[in-house]
Image (spheres, rainbow, N blue to C red):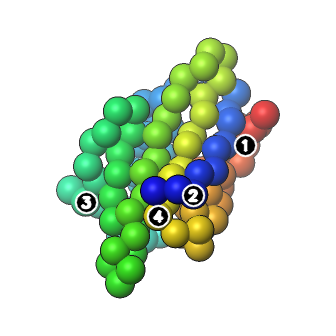
């Protein structure tokens, strides 16, 4: 995976952020918990069945900030995931 986008959040908790993003993935893309493989600090999943494109979302604490790192196989998959995650935290005040 070579396409990386990062969102910085002020004062967000990693566990709460993970659950929020999981819910958004379920609502928007029908990606359920059973489809997510746990990795250090986050999860990985097949984002597009047709292309076989994988995506990884990681939550990295750097007090008082939290970074959400989105990594995908294909550039066109990174943008919608970035937008989805950003929409989850619109009111959280990204830095």
Relative placement, left or right, of 9 versus 15 is right
Q: Earlier in the sequence, mark 4 or mark 2?
A: 2
Please, what secondary structure does the residue beneath circle 2 have? strand
Residue 21 locus on image (x, y percent): 47, 49
Task: Give the CA separation, mark 4 to mark 1.
Answer: 29 Å
On residue 3, the disc is 2
Of 53 and 85, which appears nearest the observer? 53
In this view, 85 is above or below 73? above
Q: Earlier in the sequence, mark 2 or mark 1?
A: 2
Mark 3 closeness class: few <14, some 14–19, many ≥20 residues within 10 Å: some
Please, what secondary structure does the residue beneath circle 3 have? helix
The image quadrant that residue 94 belongs to is top right
Q: Mark 2 vs mark 3: give the one in front.
A: 2
Q: Residue at x 46, y 47 (%)?
A: 57
Of 14 and 51, which appears nearest the observer? 51
Mark 4 closeness class: few <14, some 14–19, many ≥20 residues within 10 Å: some
Q: Mark 2 vs mark 1: give the one in front.
A: 2
Q: Mark 3 vs mark 1: give the one in front.
A: 3
Q: Which residue is mark 4?
A: 73
Q: Are marks 4 and 2 in contact (CB under 8 Å)?
A: yes
On residue 91, the disc is 1
Task: Give the CA separation, mark 4 to mark 2.
Answer: 6 Å
């Amino acid at each position: 995976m070579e396409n990386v986008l990062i969102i910085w959040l002020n004062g967000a908790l990693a566990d709460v952020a993970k659950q929020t993003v999981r819910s958004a993935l379920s609502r928007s893309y029908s990606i359920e918990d059973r489809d997510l493989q746990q990795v250090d600090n986050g999860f990985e999943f097949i984002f597009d069945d047709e292309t076989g494109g994988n995506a990884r979302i990681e939550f990295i604490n750097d007090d008082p900030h939290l970074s959400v790192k989105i990594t995908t196989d294909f550039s066109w998959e990174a943008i919608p995931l970035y937008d989805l995650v950003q929409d989850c935290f619109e009111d959280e005040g990204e830095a």
